[in-house]
Image (spheres, coloured by chain):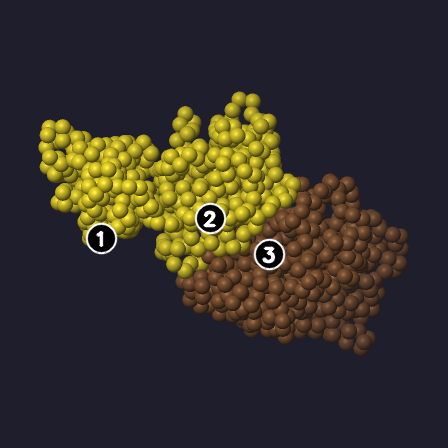
Chain colours: A brown, B yellow
Amino acid sequence: MTKIVDDPETFAASALAGFSRVYERYVRLVKGGVVRSTAVPPGKVSVIVGGGSGHYPAFAGYVGPGMADAAVAGEIFASPSTAAVARVCRNADHGGGIILGFGNYAGDVLNFGVAAERLRAEGIDVRIVTVTDDVASAPADRHLQRRGIAGDFVVFKVAGAAAEAGLAIDEVERVTRLANSRTFSFGVAFGGCTLPGAKDPLFTVPKGMMALGLGIHGEPGIRDTDIVPARDLAKLLVETVLAERPAGARRAAVLLNGLGATKYEELFVLWGAVEGYLQAAGVDPVAPEVGEYVTSLDMQGCSLTVMWLDEELERYWLAPCDTPVFRRGETFHTQPAAVRDRAEDEAPTFGLATPASQEGAGCLAGILDAMVSALGEAEAELGRIDAFAGDGDHGQGMRRGATAAREAIHQAVAGGAGARSALAVAGDAWADRAGGTSGAIWGLLLRSWSGAFTDDAAPTGADVVSGARLALDDVMRLGGAKPGDKTLVDAFVPFVASLEAASAEGAPLKEAWAKASATCEEAAQATAPLSPRLGRARPLAERSIGHPDAGAVSLALIARTISVRL
Amino acid sequence: MTKIVDDPETFAASALAGFSRVYERYVRLVKGGVVRSTAVPPGKVSVIVGGGSGHYPAFAGYVGPGMADAAVAGEIFASPSTAAVARVCRNADHGGGIILGFGNYAGDVLNFGVAAERLRAEGIDVRIVTVTDDVASAPADRHLQRRGIAGDFVVFKVAGAAAEAGLAIDEVERVTRLANSRTFSFGVAFGGCTLPGAKDPLFTVPKGMMALGLGIHGEPGIRDTDIVPARDLAKLLVETVLAERPAGARRAAVLLNGLGATKYEELFVLWGAVEGYLQAAGVDPVAPEVGEYVTSLDMQGCSLTVMWLDEELERYWLAPCDTPVFRRGETFHTQPAAVRDRAEDEAPTFGLATPASQEGAGCLAGILDAMVSALGEAEAELGRIDAFAGDGDHGQGMRRGATAAREAIHQAVAGGAGARSALAVAGDAWADRAGGTSGAIWGLLLRSWSGAFTDDAAPTGADVVSGARLALDDVMRLGGAKPGDKTLVDAFVPFVASLEAASAEGAPLKEAWAKASATCEEAAQATAPLSPRLGRARPLAERSIGHPDAGAVSLALIARTISVRL
């Protein structure tokens, strides 16, 4: 249980700041992450990794020569915001392009994905490689849909070595994908961790039992079973991981990873048996690692990872590296980097806008005002609904995001921004401040919607309607949710369809919107989830059955609020 | 709680074996410890560290160039046997002498102390430096009586660097003592750990509370208090450790150590505040370390260690080193060591003995037979008595030790050994197989007693009496217990006094022994402890009040058994 805390709200940021003080010879703190503090050759491909906090040494502990160039850190167990990903990437771009590596989770896929699009628009060549090593999370024929767990470490090690060797981005991407395609992990949990400020563990495992395949955030596993002796556990781990052994594969990078409170002595006892079973199966472990490489605070459990090596992967697995937690081979003789002032936090400036578009921006600011009021009133209720399926912070996140968006849009209006620019910065502010998946979705939604507007004219009713379609398309494409997944998409799809249909029939915007809003509300109430969802702690997911999705409910609330205002 | 176990009896040895497989590029496994697997320059001073297991990376994780030459590993939280210490030392001796470093605990002081005497008799120059950094365990004017906790790491780092730099043993000893004299630690615990195979934690801390100064094996602390925010905890740690700051001291090696289940993120949050308080007090942390350096399985808690640097200590603190868990500075280019076959486990051979002395050895073997029977019958009762004050394994340890001694003495008799040699090897076998403090005491007791005998003649009554005095003196000198400490000494002192008095009055041995045995029994029953003892888990120590000391009771039992036999 986490006991050393000041303010749970700032826990992850404080931890990252403390880390960067201890390891200033490796890293420099930027908002939302760390970048190498040592000089990097111009033109080198950057390997940038990240995800939620609470998994140290993942991911900040991997930053250094031979491994990662930077790490992005979200709140505990929560994806970093799109803005944080983009900011860290801009600070760690050396002109050779960026490999963006992270474990396969919905929030991360969304935030890193949206950030990658933004960076590409700025001319940076960004390639995404998600790690998908957890064999418990999807069958072999859906390898790329699996979760990423301790395999992160071995895949990032190879990616970092390939980049350090001077390969071009196409090659680093190819090697990283190859590494991921040959990486398989399986884990067990004996007990859950407690988040900072929380009173109860995120999940529990019945006394004397172990949960097979339970994820590093408490995601559903395969089944619970009695705790077995170390030798039998070793056999189970080895057999499960070896089930997908490629034909002829013999040499393997092997990682026996502890999740935090399963300690070194236990891991070494287990390793003795694991190594025996591997050798009996004709596997040669190459430079195996046993210890804490991807943790989950003080969770009890461990996992076995195997990356099947070919000549190329073995070379990169064994290549020198020097990071806060992992050092291999020769010393790197590094020089401090010249700190580039990227002026990230300066207020944005806006291009020329017509008075009509500026007036439109003012109207949008008024809508944001109304949204903030409505979300403020509904915060507790949204939290209550969210608590059935999630961690109960949806209302808080929406209020925080909308408030940040309102501030940003009023500043933009004061700065003379047109409708398009004003709504875009509002979206960015929402994503950056709200955090989590819903923050990313709403940031994306506003920014995409703004694409239908211009800074030359006031938005027309038709612009609003086509903006809705743009927003829906991007949310579905980047967010990855489909209708029926019990998310905001379930309410957003009928909303846009209804809005388009009414408009096509010639209804004025106010009338079309009112119709769409009613449809949306109905659809939101129909989202009572029927089954647990990926990425949620199991007991919470089970509690969600029969309750609507909070994201869909808040979308409907916002649609109704706007309806009144139009 | 420890969950990955095969046989609790072999847990520590299995963990060490697994560790040495993972890190074979650093270490080679010998019975009871690990030694460097890489070549060491002849004549280098060896730094050999050790203690109980369960504290990884202490102590095996410290072995490598620039730090330790070898580590001795006892059972979980139990001192290694004298024989293990001696064996590991012989395997890691490079001709320059040995610095034997360990935390200040009764069992370790005894076992390492007796081993050092044995090694010195073999011509190896051994110097003992105990680490005494825990300010909670004794006041400032008794610094050298304090327990050793995470300060082990910084003191051993300095010792290893001084030895690697080629200093002669006098100088390495001086620098190591200097490092210890300038090292201060203070810790808190939030919760206890569970030993392999145990159902309940070794100790508990009330919910919402933290125990100030509680030791790494659950030894009594200063007091319990409410858990405070990270900032206040930082202030408490810094103020307590800085209370003994030497005049003018400014630069310090600083270690913020986690005990196992207090995780990295918490430590980094805490470090942010600790660094601030240190700087505010005018302290410059030099190359601080934050992480798990001395653990206690999955105990929750942390400690702050400060070693005040002068120019010399700073040089050694910053010097390169390369161990499984800690690497600093330049790469060492090591070569595998030629493995020396020390033939440790060959049966001992004995010098010429007279038939009379051989016959005396046979009598001693008969006495050992009787002791094994008596201890076998009393095993459960001795365990019951021990459970009030300790971990309830006294009966088991005594039976195991006596059985090993009996085997050894019968082998010796069969090999033609005289009385002196036969009793000496019996003592060594006892210490090696029984483990713990009582094993070391009994091994020492038999070996010292044998010093009054020869291999030339049968032991006389006078020899037996003077042997008792030799044994008592060594047990008190090396064991460190004084009358009144509620140990075996409380029964042994009156036994020897009575034996000597009766002999001096001309009583034959049988009569004198019977008298001494009765005195011994009375004294043993009077040892019901009245207060908790150092080195015991608090709740157990409190439970011991009003019950006799198991070690004294088993001495009396053995005295009575021999009395019948004489």
For label 3, the crowd category at 10 Å Cα-Cα, with few meaning under 14, some 14 to 19 and many 20 or more, is: some
Q: Which badge, 2 or 1, is on the more N-terminal residue?
A: 2
x 61%, y 64%: residue = A251
Which residue is label 3 attached to?
A287
User: Looking at the picture, which amino acid does disc 3 mark?
Assistant: Ala
Label 2 vs label 3, nearer the camera: 2
As measured in the structure, the alpha-carbon distance from the residue carrying label 1 to the one carrying label 3 is 48 Å
Which residue is label 1 attached to?
B376
As measured in the structure, the alpha-carbon distance from the residue carrying label 2 to the one carrying label 3 is 27 Å
Looking at the image, can residue A43 be seen? Answer: yes
Looking at the image, can residue B226 be seen? Answer: no
The chain carrying label 1 is B
Above or below B390: residue A255: below
- Secondary-structure class at tag 1: helix
> On the rendered structure, is B95 left or right of A85?
left
Q: Are marks 2 and 1 in contact (CB under 8 Å)?
A: no
The image shows residue A151 at horizontal and vertical percentages of: 61, 61
User: Looking at the picture, which amino acid does disc 2 mark?
Assistant: Asp
The chain carrying label 2 is B
- Secondary-structure class at tag 3: strand
The chain carrying label 3 is A
**Label ID, residue B341:** 2
x 14%, y 45%: residue = B565
Q: In which quarter of the view is residue A184 placed?
A: bottom right
Q: Nearer the viewer, residue B510 or B496?
A: B510
x 79%, y 50%: residue = A94
Q: Nearer the viewer, residue A232 or A361?
A: A232
